[in-house]
Image (cartoon, rainbow, N blue to C red):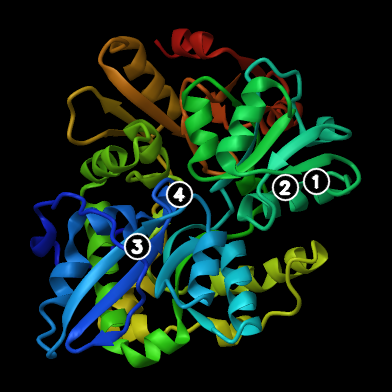
């Protein structure tokens, strides 16, 4: 989906990252106002409100174009997860933050509980089926389905969207999340190390950890979160007192977020390279999620489907005793983004995500090459084996993009079909006589 450009010309030249400042929240000292933004650089589904937005410099530039008698300083604070951002917001030290859907609910609950209410004011990126979360195992693991996890050790971050995916997926497989598996509450990096060390059998995590570990050859997909067919997203939350005191600042942030979104959608390869440079993540992994046909769709609009999914998430957090009841309707506040984007906002709501397509990223190329069929993509790869940086294919049943050389391939009478996880591939084979799984090398040979 392509949004109507807000101000692409204003951000055509990227600015370098500025240094991270102190912890002061927005307030007045004479004519000076400091705005503190909490973000997660490696959670690349939030880049339009964090890493990429910071790199573009659009927020600072637009703030100092307000000519309202104030001077502004923006302080960026980078965190690994949403929990510390919420802690800092409820302490009055962060004004605007970005995080995933489950942490957003905890943000709402903690803010209300501690007398520092917050508001969900926009969305960064989303996947309407839930493909941003994935359960992975080690490359040599013999586990092939969720039922194989019974009695096993699984690492996740409790209270995260990835934990929500794990709980729901296990429930659908007839496994109690707290009794059927031994669940370890770990930070993503700790869980990744545990998987590599063999101290856990599987890892359920959010963007970009599953793709990163798979790309590095340290993991393989066991379960594609899109199989749940429930939307998952990341969004922007602001302190209510900050929004009421500085509405022009918040609206300026949201306009800058829209500019960053336009840049990402118009220049996905360049945006991936910039995010990679800022985070240390491989650009190929960033593109898997943030590319032209990536797993994530970027759009600030607070879509009804996402709000509905947020309401369904409350029960998962309540069952884990992480929150009580949450009034989602009072937490969601689209006033500021509507005012910031004007008529563009209605166009965003009316637009639909572009269908997934295979892509090949060639070395030195500033754009990727798209393919209508997996076989056509494989045939091209077979002829250009040495000049390829990365190749991506959408899962046949869920549409989730995955690395072509890491996908599970099935050959049948219709051609060659890719899948993220072995269980979905086997389900297809079971329902199509004559179909069988083949190796990536075999798939390349058949296509050529």
- Specify the quadrant that holds the N terminus: bottom left
What is the CA distance from the residue labelled 1 to the residue labelled 4?
24 Å
Q: Earlier in the sequence, mark 1 or mark 4?
A: 4
What is the CA distance from the residue labelled 4 to the residue labelled 2?
18 Å
Query: Label 2, on which residue?
Result: 166
Query: Label 1, on which residue?
Result: 170
What is the CA distance from the residue labelled 1 to the residue labelled 3?
32 Å
Q: Is residue 159 left or right of residue 305?
A: right
Above or below, 285 against 24 in this view is above
What is the CA distance from the residue labelled 2 to the residue labelled 1?
6 Å
Q: Earlier in the sequence, mark 3 or mark 2?
A: 3
Query: Label 3, on which residue?
Result: 49
- Specify the quadrant that holds the C terminus: top left
Q: Earlier in the sequence, mark 1 or mark 3?
A: 3
Mark 2: few/some/many CA within 10 Å (<14, 14-19, 20+): many
- Residue 228 in the image, given as x and y percentages of width and height: 68, 51
Q: Earlier in the sequence, mark 4 or mark 2?
A: 4
**Outermost residue toward the right in this view:** 179
Disc ID at residue 43: 4
Mark 4: few/some/many CA within 10 Å (<14, 14-19, 20+): many
- Residue 140 in the image, given as x and y percentages of width and height: 67, 15
What is the CA distance from the residue labelled 3 to the residue labelled 4?
11 Å
Q: Nearer the viewer, residue 198 or 425?
A: 198
Which of the 4 image quarters holds residue 388?
Answer: top left
What is the CA distance from the residue labelled 3 to the residue labelled 2?
27 Å
Of circles 4 and 2, which is in front?
A: 4
Asked whether the residues under the numbered discs 3 and 2 touch, taking CB atoms below 8 Å apart as contact, a structural biologist would say no
């Amino acid at each position: 989906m392509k949004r109507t450009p807000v101000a692409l010309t204003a951000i055509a030249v990227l600015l370098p990252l500025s240094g991270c400042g102190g912890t002061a929240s927005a307030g007045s000292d004479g004519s000076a106002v400091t705005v503190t933004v909490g973000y997660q650089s490696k959670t690349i589904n939030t880049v339009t409100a964090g890493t990429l937005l910071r790199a573009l410099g659009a927020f600072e530039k637009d703030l100092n174009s307000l000519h309202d008698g104030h001077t502004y300083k923006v302080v960026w604070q980078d965190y690994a997860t949403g929990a510390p951002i919420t802690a800092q917001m409820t302490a009055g030290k962060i004004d605007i933050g970005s995080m995933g859907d489950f942490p957003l609910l905890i943000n709402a609950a903690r803010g209300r509980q501690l007398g520092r209410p917050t508001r969900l004011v926009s969305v960064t990126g989303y996947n309407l089926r839930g493909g941003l979360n994935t359960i992975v195992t080690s490359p040599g693991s013999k586990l092939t389905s969720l039922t194989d996890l019974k009695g096993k050790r699984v690492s996740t971050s409790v209270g995260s969207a990835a934990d929500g995916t794990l709980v729901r997926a296990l429930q659908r497989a007839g496994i109690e999340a707290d009794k059927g598996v031994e669940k370890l509450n770990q930070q993503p990096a700790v869980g990744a190390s545990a998987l590599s060390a063999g101290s856990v059998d599987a890892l359920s995590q959010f963007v970009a950890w599953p793709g990163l570990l798979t790309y590095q050859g340290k993991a393989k997909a066991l379960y594609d979160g899109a199989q749940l067919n429930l939307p998952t997203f990341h969004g922007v939350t602001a302190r209510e007192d900050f929004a009421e005191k500085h509405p022009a600042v918040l609206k300026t942030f949201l306009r800058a977020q829209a500019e960053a979104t336009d840049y990402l959608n118009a220049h996905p390869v360049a945006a991936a390279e910039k995010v990679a440079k800022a985070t240390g993540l491989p650009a190929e992994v960033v593109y898997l999620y943030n590319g032209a046909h990536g797993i994530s769709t970027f759009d600030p609009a607070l879509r009804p489907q996402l709000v509905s999914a947020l309401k369904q998430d409350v029960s998962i957090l309540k069952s884990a005793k992480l929150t009580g009841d949450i009034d989602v309707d009072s937490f969601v506040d689209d006033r500021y983004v509507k005012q910031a984007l004007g008529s563009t906002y209605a166009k965003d709501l009316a637009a639909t995500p572009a269908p997934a397509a295979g892509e090949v990223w060639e070395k030195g190329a500033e754009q990727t090459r798209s393919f209508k069929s997996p076989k056509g993509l494989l045939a091209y790869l077979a002829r250009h084996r040495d000049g390829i940086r990365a190749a991506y294919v959408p899962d046949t049943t869920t549409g989730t993009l995955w690395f072509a050389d890491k996908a599970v391939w099935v050959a049948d009478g219709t051609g060659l079909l890719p899948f993220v996880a072995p269980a979905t591939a086997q389900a297809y084979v079971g329902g199509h006589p004559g179909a069988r799984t083949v190796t990536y090398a075999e798939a390349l040979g058949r296509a050529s």
